[in-house]
Image (cartoon, helix red, strand yellow):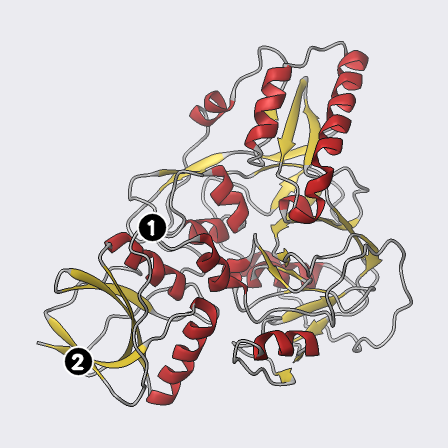
Amino acid sequence: MSKPHRVPYPPLLLTPMKSLKKTSASLPHTGIALPFVLLAVGLLSGCQLEPTTKNVLELPPITGFPQPTIAPPPDTVEEIQPKLADITAREFAIAKDSGIVGGLAEITVQAGDTLPDIARHFGLGYNDITIANPVINPWTPEAGARVMLPLRFILPDAPRKGIVLNLANMRLFYYSSKQPDAVFTYPIGIGREGWNTPLGQTTIVAKTVKPTWTVPESIRREHAAKGDHLPKTVPPGPYNPLGDYALPLGFGNYLVHGTNKPYGVGMQVSHGCVRLYPEDIEVLFKKTSVGTPVRIIHQPYMTAWDGDMLYLEAHEPLPKWAGQKERQQKSLLKQLRQTADERGVTVDWEKVDRILQRADGIPTPILTASPELPELVAQVPEVQHPEHFYGQPVVPELTDSDLVLIVADFDNELTAQQLAAMLSHQGPPIPARQIEKDGSYQVIAGPFKDQKEAESVAHRIKMDFEIDAKLGMMTIQ
């Protein structure tokens, strides 16, 4: 398996070039804070004209959307997505009288893995895998670590028809009339604070292949304030944040679409639209049609029966709804007391409290004498490690006289690896690796075909990471 962040090199020299008058950044040597993670995946994305503060509760008239453009479906849309071994992901059978699907699993980390790569391969978002594995560094997990795959989901309390988007766990559920006993579920990226994805009911009003992004003036102003001047339109291609498929909705300028920054899925990073992994939006695009109903909800606390056992799944409410947390938890407890009385069962209230405090999105049984989470984890199956995770970046080795960018120097190897991994997972990817040099660790991006390409990438690094990279030449001794 390729190791994208550590490439063995012969002795080498990095020769700075004066044509790009910048200096490498000095970052904290103890680690890169969460804002850098958000910057790494969250920029140049958005669909609506202005920030919204309201929920859309009614279906407005449909105006101004493009005529549908529908690509011919492949023989089997499932071929678009990664082939998995030993586990089910994305499509689940719904058992009769059950509101819970899927199962937990785990995988052992190998050198060069990142949690975002693992998450994407198994149909999970950044939020899913990091919250379920809080002690593991997302970008530099230690080889041999065991990663929980939280692939069990309680279905939202909503009609099982068309698309249901639950913002609280950043997940889309699609119920097809052609497959009434199944649900398709995908992780999503949603609007960040101030650009919240609205709640409400609507429909898909068009289907567009290879969409052109008309950049809203509000987003152009936001980027211009940072010195990043966006064009009025962005054509299809690697720099288009809408990806290859877009499903316009019936309110505002909101879309369900793909992305050129797949590792922002599972984060609040868009300007209000809903983004999916490229492989997931392609399947959803081909399964849905104009007129498919779409319901957007925020349900951080969900319960479901599986046989004789009652389960609770808890998520931290999104910031916009944080003020409703106490009221929502009181409503949940009232519901559980009523359910316990009706079913003649006993709820372990201390366990309920622990699950609410944990808020990790893992459905956990809550009746007395039911197993605790550690017991559940001890019983989960281990998934076979694939030769290569779907979509995982492969960083090419450098050769003599390659044009590169010297991004940063660190005293700490893990910090350098982390920045290199984040650069490699940009959209489009920026090939990067860390190299030990004179007792420190340099992050090197490249190779680049010419100075123009290198300068363009240096600009992106400046905008996304606030780091000044400098141009250099690789010399292998």
Q: Is residue 306 left or right of residue 203?
A: left
- At which x and y percent is residue 414? 28, 52
**Residue 257 numbered mark, or none:** none
Looking at the image, is mark 2 or mark 1 earlier in the sequence?
Answer: 1
Q: Disc 2 vs disc 1: Cβ atoms closer than 8 Å?
A: no
Residue depicted at x 73% and y 44%: 298
Viewer-proximal residue among 237 and 98: 237
Identify the image quadrant of residue 58: bottom right
- In the rendered image, is residue 124 in sight? no
Viewer-proximal residue among 447 and 15: 15
- At which x and y percent is residue 435? 21, 64
Q: Could you give the CA–CA distance between mark 2 and mark 1, rounded to whole angstroms?
A: 28 Å
**Given the current orientation, which residue lies at the most extreme left position?**
477
Examine the rendered structure and indicate whether residue 333 appears above or below residue 209: above
Residue depicted at x 55% and y 35%: 360
- In the rendered image, is residue 28 in sight? yes
Q: Amino acid at mark 2?
A: Asp
Image quarter (top left, top right, bottom left or bottom right) of the C terminus = bottom left
Examine the rendered structure and indicate whether residue 406 appears above or below residue 321: below
**Residue 400 numbered mark, or none:** 2
